[in-house]
Image (tube, rainbow, N blue to C red):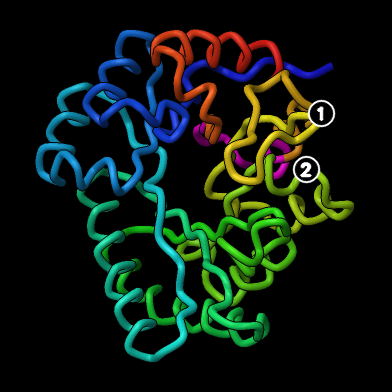
């Protein structure tokens, strides 16, 4: 018998209401009594970092994470250096916003050499860790579903993410478990146990059948086939008691009124997560 998650852990990952500005998303969370928000960097940039910090601070919301850093691989050394510089800016933004974790979407290979690209991911994290540590920010490696390997990330299993994270202190680098990306993995529960106190984030949505779109095809919880409660129970059993972010890429959901999306999100969180 699974218990229901506490509403005190619910976080709106801002991409779920993508048509809202950060100001609108913050106001929507306050109206709905959602205590956490996970901003995206492009939304912060639209408003400006200082104003974003002020709006979130004044609202009383807490920041569960900042999306996103990463994208380390690039064809030239100069490009890789520029991406590392951007990751340092992302760390600074996370610190200013009060997030403990910067989510890393690690990036695709710029050519056909996927092994080399994974080496560049490792190198990028190596170089970013000291900077992030000095600013009190943890780096959360988020593995993406293998269908994203060519476009978004060469880190495609929780096992790969664990292997990378284990090269650093648990206070520096961990993993983000997003059910949409890992639910299919035969080693999922083994790797969740392996991750243990390195789990820095837990993201929920659902896998719709048939899958309507490669990128914009995530479903609201309960509309698909993912064993959401079983996965949540496992991350809790190994020690994760942090915020639970609802992160949904779906244009039909984006086109709905934001307050309607949040109302449904709260209901489905209680019913299915």
Q: Is residue 192 left or right of residue 25?
A: right
Of all residues, the one furthest to the right in this rendering is 186
Q: Is residue 143 left or right of residue 255?
A: right
Q: Position of residue 9 (x, y in %)?
A: 50, 25
Q: Is residue 255 left or right of residue 53?
A: right
Q: Which residue is mark 2?
A: 183
Q: Which dot, 1 or 2, sits closer to the camera?
A: 1
Is label 1 in contact with label 2 (beta carbons under 8 Å)?
yes
Q: CA distance from mark 1 to mark 2?
A: 9 Å
Residue at image position (76%, 52%) is: 193
In the rendered image, the vertical position of residue 146 relative to residue 131, given as above or below: above
* Image quarter hosting the C terminus: top right
Q: Secondary structure at mark 1?
A: loop
Q: Which mark is residue 225?
A: 1
Residue at image position (46%, 68%) is: 71
Q: Where, by quadrant of the figure, is residue 201 drawn?
A: top right
Q: Is residue 251 left or right of residue 214?
A: left
The stretch drawn in magenta includes residue 242? yes
Residue 220 visible (yes or no): yes
- Determine crowd level at label 2: few under 14, some 14-19, many 20+ residues with C-alpha closer than 10 A: many
Q: Position of residue 239 (x, y in %)?
A: 64, 42
Q: Where, by quadrant of the figure, is residue 46 drawn?
A: top left
């Amino acid at each position: 018998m699974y218990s229901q998650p506490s509403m005190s852990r619910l976080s709106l990952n801002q991409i779920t209401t993508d048509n809202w500005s950060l100001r609108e998303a913050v106001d929507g969370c306050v109206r709905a009594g959602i205590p956490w928000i996970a901003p995206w960097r492009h939304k912060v940039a639209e408003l400006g970092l200082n104003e974003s910090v002020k709006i979130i601070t004044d609202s009383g919301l807490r920041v569960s994470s900042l999306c996103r850093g990463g994208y380390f691989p690039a064809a030239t050394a100069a490009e890789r250096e520029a991406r590392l510089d951007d990751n340092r800016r992302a760390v600074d933004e996370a610190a200013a916003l009060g997030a403990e974790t910067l989510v890393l979407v690690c990036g695709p290979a710029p050519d056909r050499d996927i092994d080399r690209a994974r080496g560049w991911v490792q190198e990028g994290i190596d170089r970013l860790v000291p900077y992030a540590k000095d600013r009190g920010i943890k780096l959360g490696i988020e593995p993406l579903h293998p269908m994203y390997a060519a476009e978004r990330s060469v880190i495609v299993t929780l096992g790969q993410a664990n292997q990378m994270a284990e090269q650093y202190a648990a206070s520096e680098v961990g993993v983000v478990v997003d059910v949409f990306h890992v639910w299919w993995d035969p080693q999922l529960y083994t790797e969740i146990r392996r991750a243990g106190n390195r789990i820095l984030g837990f993201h929920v949505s659902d896998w719709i059948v048939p899958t309507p779109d490669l990128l914009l095809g995530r479903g609201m919880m309960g509309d698909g086939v993912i064993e959401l409660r079983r996965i949540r129970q496992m991350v809790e059993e190994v020690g994760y008691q942090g915020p639970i972010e609802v992160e949904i890429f779906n244009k039909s959901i984006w086109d709905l009124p934001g307050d309607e999306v949040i109302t449904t999100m709260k209901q489905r969180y209680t019913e299915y997560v």
